[in-house]
Every structure is written in structure tokens, then in C-alpha cells.
Amino acid sequence: MFRLTALFALLISLVACSEPDVVLKIGNSHSPDRTLIGTLKTQVTVYRSASFSVTDTDLTCLGASNDADYDTGWENEKVTFNILLNCDDGRTGKIIAKLTSEIGRENLKGMGVGKLNDGQEIVLAVGDLTLQNKIE
């Protein structure tokens, strides 16, 4: 029982320190949706920059931002990123994302919206990728 408890505690600590998951949904009413997944990387000291790579194995998109509006509150930290997106099929886009974390930079999560240069809409989700948090 002690081993199981210790293993569970180790897994929880690893998850808490890990980089947050990213889901990017691309689509509109004229085409089927595509869902890409990846991981968000942020500057460690202050959320002034962020980047991610997402893929569905056929399409890969890279997002990056060095433009962030940062606000520290009593219980959490909030940051708004203006993200430029480049996909390996030549499409580009822009996303505005609002993310929140607990003080101490843990549990970063949030949403973003944007458009690709071909008019397709983008929805970005950042945080724990569990079935309860899927994008509809």
C-alpha cells in the first residue's frame, strides 16, 4: 500500500511540474474540423513568451508569442498572449489566448480564439487534457 501511495504522489508531482497540454481545433461550417495536440512552453520566470507545436500527424502548426499582457492577482496570475501561428501546409494565423495559473506558475490553463489566413476558425485550449476538458 505504501508503494502505491508513493507512486501516486510521484505521478502527481510530475504532472504538476509538467508543461501544459495544448489542443488546437481548426475548422468552419464549410470543412470538417481538425484537432491537433501538443505542449505549451513558456518562459520560466514570467509568462512573457510562449510557444507550442501541435500536430495530428498529417498537419503540424507552430505557435509563438513574445507579446503578452501580464497581471498578478491575489490568488492567480493572468496573461493574455497574441500568438502567431505557422502551419507546415503554408497557412498562417493569429490567436488571442487568455491563460490563468495559480500563484507559483502551476496549473496553467485557458482558451484562445483566432483565424487562419484561409478564413478557417481556430479554437485553442490549454491545460489538462482529460475527457472532461474536450473541445466540443
Image (cartoon, grey):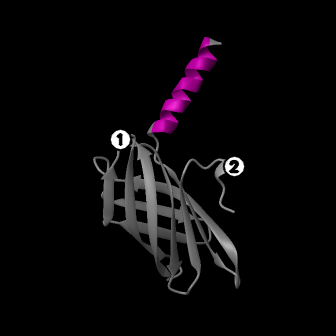
Task: Kindly identify the residue that appears in the image at 35 percent across and 41 percent down.
Answer: 74
Pick the quarter of the image with the N terminus: top right
Dot 2 amino acid type = Leu
Name the chief secondary structure element in magenta.
helix
Task: Kindly identify the residue that appears in the image at 60 percent across and 18 percent down.
Answer: 5
Q: Give the CA separation, mark 1 to mark 2.
A: 30 Å
Marks 1, 2: nearer the viewer: 1
Left or right: residue 65 compared with residue 124:
left
Q: Which mark is residue 121?
A: none
For the residue pair 110 and 55, the one nearer the viewer reads as 110
Please tell me whether residue 54 is drawn above or below residue 131 in the rendered image: below
- Residue 14: in magenta span: yes
> In the rendered image, which quarter is residue 98 located in?
bottom left
| Residue 49, image x, y percentages | 33, 60
Please tell me whether residue 86 is drawn above or below residue 97 in the rendered image: below
For the residue pair 61 and 84, the one nearer the viewer reads as 84
Task: Kindly identify the residue that appears in the image at 54 percent across and 80 percent down.
Answer: 89
Q: Secondary structure at mark 2?
A: helix
Write down the residue under mark 2. Answer: 131
Residue, far left: 45
For the residue pair 74 and 87, the one nearer the viewer reads as 74
Residue, far top: 2
Write down the residue under mark 1. Answer: 74
Q: Secondary structure at mark 1?
A: loop
How many dots with numbers?
Answer: 2
Crowd around label 1: few <14 · some 14–19 · many ≥20 (10 Å): few
Where are the magenta residues, as a range? 2-16
> In the rendered image, which quarter is residue 122 located in?
bottom right
